[in-house]
Amino acid sequence: MANSLDDVVAGSLRVLDSYGLEFCTMRRVAAELGVQPGALYHHVADKQTLLGLMADRIVADVEVDADLAATSARLRDAMLAVRDGAEVVATTAAFRLGVFALEEALAAHSDRDVARTLLLYVVGHTQATQLHRQAAAVGIVEPDPDLDASFERGLAIILR
């Protein structure tokens, strides 16, 4: 049975959740789907394109509305729900590979500068949070009980 683009993205997210972004390779995604790596290129041109699709999927269900604080919290939750989710979104946003719809939706409720600043803050803070939590989980650092509160404080500063 042939895999669809949706299957490739879903398989990639399963690999991401299991191994993290560093080890989310086209070869491993192909193995997850039971195909040869070349079969993936029938659906995506390269890994960067796949990362953009993964980022779009990670944030796809984030409802964007005029309550930018609540929207930001939903975005953070969506990224935290996937191992290295914020890193995938950060990479694709930096390279302009994905998440354009999210930035446009934020801009519709504010302006382009606020939307870009908010997106960079939420993704960056979430990326740091995920990295810290992963390090704390394996005993490299002590857990930081202030991560959630510091996110809220920073968000309040931006949205003043």
Image (spheres, grey):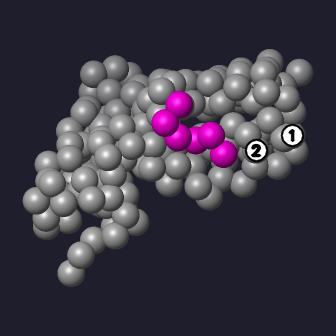
* Circles 1 and 2: CB atoms closer than 8 Å: yes
Q: Tell me which secondary structure the magenta stretch mostly adopts.
A: loop
Q: CA distance from mark 1 to mark 2?
A: 7 Å
Residue 50, can we see it? Answer: yes
The residue that appears at 84% across and 41% down in the rendered structure is: 108
The stretch drawn in magenta includes residue 100: yes
Residue 59 or 45: which is nearer the viewer? 45
Report the disc number at residue 19: none
**Disc 1 crowd, CA 10 A, few/some/many (<14, 14-19, 20+):** some
Amino acid identity at mark 2: Ala
Q: Quadrant of residue 22?
A: top left
The residue that label 1 is drawn on is: 109
Name the residue furthest bottom: 1
Start-end of magenta stretch: 96-101
- Per the image, label 1 sits on a secondary structure element best described as loop
Residue 107 vertical position relative to residue 26 in the rendered view, above or below: above
Image-based side of 58 in relation to 121, left or right? left
Q: Position of residue 138 (x, y in %)?
A: 26, 32
- Per the image, label 2 sits on a secondary structure element best described as helix
The residue that appears at 10% across and 59% down in the rendered structure is: 36
Query: Where the C terminus falls, by quadrant?
Result: top right
The residue that label 2 is drawn on is: 105
**Disc 2 crowd, CA 10 A, few/some/many (<14, 14-19, 20+):** some
Residue 85 or 105: which is nearer the viewer? 105
Amino acid identity at mark 1: His
Residue 55 or 70: which is nearer the viewer? 55
